[in-house]
Amino acid sequence: MKKYITQIRRRNIVILLLLILVYLGNSMFTNQHHSGNLPVEMMQDEKIFAGSSSCASCHKEIFQQHIKTAHYIDSRPASKEFIKGSFQTGKNRYVYNKFLEVVLEKKKNRFYQTAYVSGEVSQSESFDVVIGSGRKGQTYLYWRDDKLFQLPVSYYTPTNSWVNSPGFATNFIHFDRQIPAQCLECHGTYAKAEDKLDNLSTFDRNQIMYGVDCERCHGPAAEHVRFQSSHPNEKAKYIINARHLSRQQRLDACALCHSGFRTGTKPAFSFMVGDKLDDFSTTNYSPDSVAVLDVHGNQYGLLTASKCFKMSAEMDCSSCHDPHKNEFNSPKIFSQKCMSCHTEALHNTCTIPAKKGLVLSDNCIDCHMPLLASSKILLELSNASQAIPDEVRTHRIAVYEQKSREFLKKKGLLSN
């Protein structure tokens, strides 16, 4: 009997150890793929990050909505779960010409871009970091020691295909575009980086928080979490609340990443929400220029050049966008926000005559903030003879007559 009990105890101990190993394995996976659980203590401006999952206990609904946004998954360590392009035979090649091609391939549990020149392997690098949620597309980075470099082939969602990485030549294959910390400043929450004299960067791989999560806008939250956990009924402290910021401070928080390429005057990740952006970086082009309209374009400048913005004392990015929610491809949601100011009582509604089958208030966006072809982001499909421009939604609110006609024709409400 004692021998039998001993065997049961031993079996239970083994089961318990296996469960512990499974738990630790899951925790490690979470640390690799989600910034909410931090593998090491990270600090910014002497403040400690808590990880976005620590927000869930008090802000469960907001947290659950936010993790579905493009911001939250804007960067991740590369894995099958996050890479959007296909690695199936017949869909995994990007052909430049009859001499040059890149093959997208999986080897064991890793993914690679392998360049072939006249049928011979020239260079092969692994997918290490995914940049972009996949809503419009993705590009990919690989590690070389403590430096990050961009891979030559990216993914374009509208065509569901591999394309040349933006700005990469199509007459030769190169893997040498090094990534500065400024890129991760906009595509992530935090990275411990050191800027070099050549304006390039080295990174501590263990000190990166991928994705734009809660603490990117609200600041490192460890002190806030500790205080609120022991004082749940007291007014929130040690956290950035946008409601307490001025209009320009709120605008600057978005303009950090949505005002085009800026020249940094201080190291990446120095800027904190609430700071004055011009103290950390400068622009070198017209603030409302549509000539630089692209995925990194100056949407802040276009918005502030709009009549709607100029006539309002309070309008900012959050007047239309809820950063906690996934509102992509929802023109009705945004249009309702337009209609809160453009009312019949104020005589400033749309001048297009009412037509049967057309509810103007359901879509102001495609006429007044239309998709426009970028002159900066040109993409080429495999074996293509001509580049196609990416389409980006302008944030200059205005009357676009041609786009309005196209919208009405699409709805069948305007003849040719």
Image (cartoon, grey):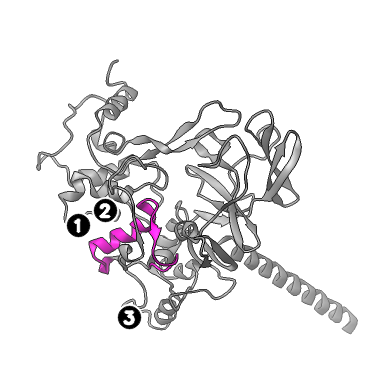
Image spot of residue 196 (x, y percent): 52, 65
Q: Are marks 1 and 3 in contact (CB under 8 Å)?
A: no
| Part of the protein shown in magenta | 243-271
Q: Nearer the viewer, mark 3 or mark 2?
A: 2
Q: Residues within 10 Å of mark 3 (few under 14, many from 20)?
A: few
User: Could you tell me which residue is drawn at 50 percent across and 35 percent down?
Assistant: 379
Question: How far separated are the C-alphas under marks 3 and 2?
Answer: 29 Å
Tell whether label 1 touches label 2 (CB within 8 Å): yes
Q: Nearer the viewer, residue 229 or 87?
A: 87
Residue at the spot 37% in from the left edge and 68% down from the top edge = 272
Q: Say left or right for 416 vs 85.
A: left
> What is the CA distance from the residue labelled 1 to the residue labelled 3?
29 Å
Dot 3 amino acid type: Glu
Identify whether 235 is placed above or below 158.
below
Q: Quadrant of residue 338?
A: top left
| Residue located beneath label 3 in the image | 234
Amino acid type for the residue under numbered disc 1 = Glu
> Is 181 situated left or right of 219 in this image?
right
In the rendered image, residue 201 lying in the magenta stretch gets the answer: no
The residue pinned by badge 2 equals 319
Asked which secondary structure carries label 3, the reply is: loop
Who comes first in sequence, dot 2 or dot 1? 1
Identity, as a three-letter code, of the amino acid under mark 2: Ser
Q: Earlier in the sequence, mark 1 or mark 3?
A: 3
- Alpha carbon of mark 2 to alpha carbon of mark 1: how far? 8 Å
Residue 314 marker: 1
Front-lying residue, 393 or 262 = 262
